[in-house]
Image (cartoon, helix red, strand yellow):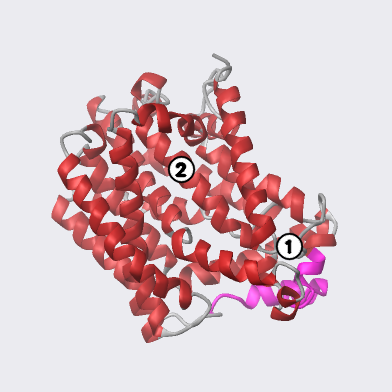
C-alpha cells in the first residue's frame, strides 16, 4: 500500500518546460469571454424587473449590447474552457502512463479538491460557480481512459444532444431541486423581489445566506437544463483532441483547422442570431439553437486563434494572454471576488444600477487588470495562488511557490 501511494505522489506538478503555451493562450482568451458573459449576473442586471431596466438612461444601448453579447459571447467561451479541461485531463493521463504511475486515485483527489474550492467560491462569493460541475464531470472521464476514439466521440455526441432531449421532453422538470432554496429564502425572509436589494446592500452574512439559497437554484439549473451533460460532452471532445495530440501539431493540421474555422463561423454566426433572439424564451427553438449553434461558433473561434498562433506574427500577438491562462483557476475565482466587491453589499454595492453599456466596460477593465497582474505574479512565482493551493492539496506535500 505504501509503495502504491509513493507511486501516486511521484506524479509532480507540470513544469514550465512541460506546458504548451498555446493552451494557456486559449484559456486566457476564454477567460475574457467568461467574464464578459458573467457580468450580467455579477452586476445583478439579470435579476432586475423589466421596469427597472427601462428606467435606465442607457436602456436602448443596453438592449443592443445585450443582444451582441448573446450573439457573439454567451456560451462560446465556457465551451472552449470546458474542452481545454478535457485536453488537460489527457496530458495528465499521458504523463502518468509514461511514468507507470497510478492515475485514478490521484485524479479523484484532484477533482475532489476542485469541488471544495468551487463550493467555497459559490457560498462566499458567487453562486453560479462552474467548478463543482467540472469536478463531477471530470470524475466521469475516468471510465473512458481506455476507450477507443470512436467510443469517446459517440458518447460526446450523445452528451451534447442530451440537453435538447431533456428540455423538449421535460424529462427533468425545472424546479425539481429548488425546495431547499425556497426553504432558505423563507427562513431568512428573502424573496425573488428582494434578491437584488439584499445582494447589493446586504452584509456579508446576508450575502452568504442568499448565496446558499441560490446555490440550490444553480444545482437545479445545471441538472434540469442538461448543462451537466453538455459540459461532459465538451470534456470528452477535449480528451479526444488531447489524446491525439492535435495541440502539439497545429502546423500539420493547418488545412483541417482552416476548414473548421470557416465552417464554424459560416454555420455558427447565423445560427447564433436565432440563439440570441430566443435566449430569454423557453421555446423549443431556443433549446435546439443552443444545441446546434454554440459549438460550431466556439470551434470557429478556437480554430481562428490556432491559425493566428501558427501565423508569422501569432506568438507576438497572442502570447500576452498566456499568463492569465496559466492562472486560470485563480483568475476565474478572482473575477468573482473583484466583481462582487464592485456590485455587492460587501463592497461598493453598485449592483442593479447599470446595464450592459456600463457593466461591460467594467468587466473588460477587470480582465485587463488580470492580464497585467498575472504577468507580474508569474515573473516572481511558479503558480497562481489557487493553483498552488490546489496542487499542494492534491499531491499532499509542500510545493515551493517562489521561483
Residue 284 sits in which quadrant?
Answer: bottom left
Which of 121 and 273 lies nearest the eye of the viewer? 273
Question: What stretch of residues is rendered in magenta?
Answer: 176-198
Which residue is labeled 1 in the image? 354
Where is residue 92 drawn, in percent x and y? Answer: 33, 34
Q: Is residue 194 left or right of residue 73?
A: right
Local packing at callout 2 (Cα closer than 10 Å; few below 14, some 14-19, many 20+) is many
Q: Is 98 colored magenta in this rendering?
A: no
Camera-nearest residue between 249 and 97: 249
Q: Which mark is residue 71?
A: none
Query: Is residue 48 something that shows in the picture?
Result: yes
What residue is pinned by disc 2? Answer: 29
Residue 163 position (above or below residue 135): below
Name the residue located 32 percent from the left edge and 46 percent from the top edge: 304
Q: Residue 173, position in %: x, y?
A: 48, 83
Q: Please name whichever residue, 262 or 226, is drawn nearer the observer in this view of the structure.
A: 262
Q: Is residue 213 above or below residue 171?
A: above
- Which of the 4 image quarters holds residue 268? bottom left
Quadrant of the rendering where the C terminus is positioned: top right
Q: Does dot 2 land on a helix, a strand or a loop?
A: helix
Q: Between marks 1 and 2, how big is the CA–CA gap?
A: 25 Å
| 300 with respect to 375 (left or right) | left
Q: Which quadrant would the N terminus be assigned to in this image?
A: top left
Q: Position of residue 273 (x, y in %)?
A: 41, 71
* Total labels drawn: 2
On the image, the x and y values in percent for residue 230 come to 37, 63
| Sequence-first tag of 1 and 2 | 2
Amino acid at each position: 500500500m505504501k509503495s502504491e501511494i509513493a507511486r501516486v505522489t511521484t506524479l509532480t506538478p507540470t513544469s514550465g518546460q512541460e506546458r504548451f503555451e498555446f493552451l494557456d493562450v486559449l484559456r486566457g482568451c476564454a477567460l475574457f469571454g467568461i467574464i464578459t458573459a458573467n457580468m450580467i449576473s455579477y452586476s445583478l442586471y439579470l435579476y432586475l424587473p423589466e421596469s427597472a431596466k427601462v428606467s435606465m438612461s442607457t436602456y436602448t444601448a443596453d438592449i443592443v449590447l445585450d443582444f451582441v453579447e448573446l450573439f457573439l459571447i454567451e456560451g462560446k467561451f465556457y465551451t472552449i474552457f470546458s474542452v481545454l479541461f478535457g485536453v488537460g485531463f489527457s496530458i495528465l493521463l499521458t504523463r502518468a502512463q509514461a511514468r507507470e504511475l497510478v492515475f485514478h486515485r490521484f485524479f479523484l483527489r484532484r477533482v475532489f479538491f476542485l469541488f471544495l474550492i468551487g463550493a467555497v467560491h459559490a457560498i462566499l462569493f458567487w453562486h453560479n460557480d462552474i467548478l463543482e460541475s467540472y469536478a463531477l464531470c471530470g470524475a466521469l472521464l475516468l471510465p473512458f481512459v481506455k476507450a477507443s476514439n470512436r467510443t469517446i466521440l459517440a458518447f460526446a455526441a450523445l452528451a451534447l444532444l442530451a440537453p435538447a432531449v431533456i428540455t423538449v421532453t421535460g424529462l427533468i422538470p425545472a424546479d425539481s431541486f429548488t425546495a431547499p432554496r425556497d426553504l432558505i429564502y423563507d427562513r431568512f425572509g428573502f424573496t425573488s423581489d428582494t434578491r437584488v436589494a439584499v445582494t447589493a446592500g446586504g452584509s456579508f452574512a446576508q450575502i452568504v445566506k442568499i448565496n446558499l439559497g441560490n446555490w440550490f437554484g444553480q444545482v437545479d439549473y445545471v441538472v434540469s437544463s442538461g448543462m451537466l451533460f453538455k459540459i461532459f460532452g465538451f470534456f470528452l471532445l477535449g480528451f479526444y483532441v488531447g489524446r491525439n495530440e492535435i495541440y502539439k501539431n497545429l502546423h500539420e493540421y493547418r488545412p483541417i483547422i482552416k476548414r473548421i474555422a470557416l465552417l464554424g463561423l459560416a454555420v455558427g454566426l447565423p445560427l447564433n442570431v436565432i440563439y440570441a433572439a430566443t435566449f430569454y424564451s423557453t421555446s423549443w427553438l431556443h433549446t435546439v439553437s443552443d444545441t446546434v449553434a454554440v459549438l460550431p461558433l466556439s470551434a470557429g473561434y478556437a480554430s481562428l486563434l490556432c491559425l493566428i498562433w501558427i501565423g508569422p506574427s501569432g506568438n507576438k500577438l497572442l502570447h500576452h494572454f498566456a499568463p492569465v491562462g496559466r492562472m486560470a483557476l485563480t483568475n476565474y475565482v478572482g473575477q468573482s471576488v473583484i466583481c462582487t466587491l464592485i456590485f455587492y453589499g460587501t463592497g461598493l454595492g453598485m449592483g442593479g444600477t447599470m446595464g450592459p453599456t456600463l457593466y461591460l466596460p467594467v468587466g473588460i477593465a477587470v480582465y485587463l487588470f488580470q492580464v497585467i497582474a498575472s504577468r507580474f505574479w508569474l515573473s516572481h512565482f511558479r503558480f497562481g495562488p489557487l493553483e498552488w493551493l490546489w496542487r499542494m492539496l492534491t499531491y499532499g506535500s509542500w510545493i515551493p511557490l517562489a521561483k
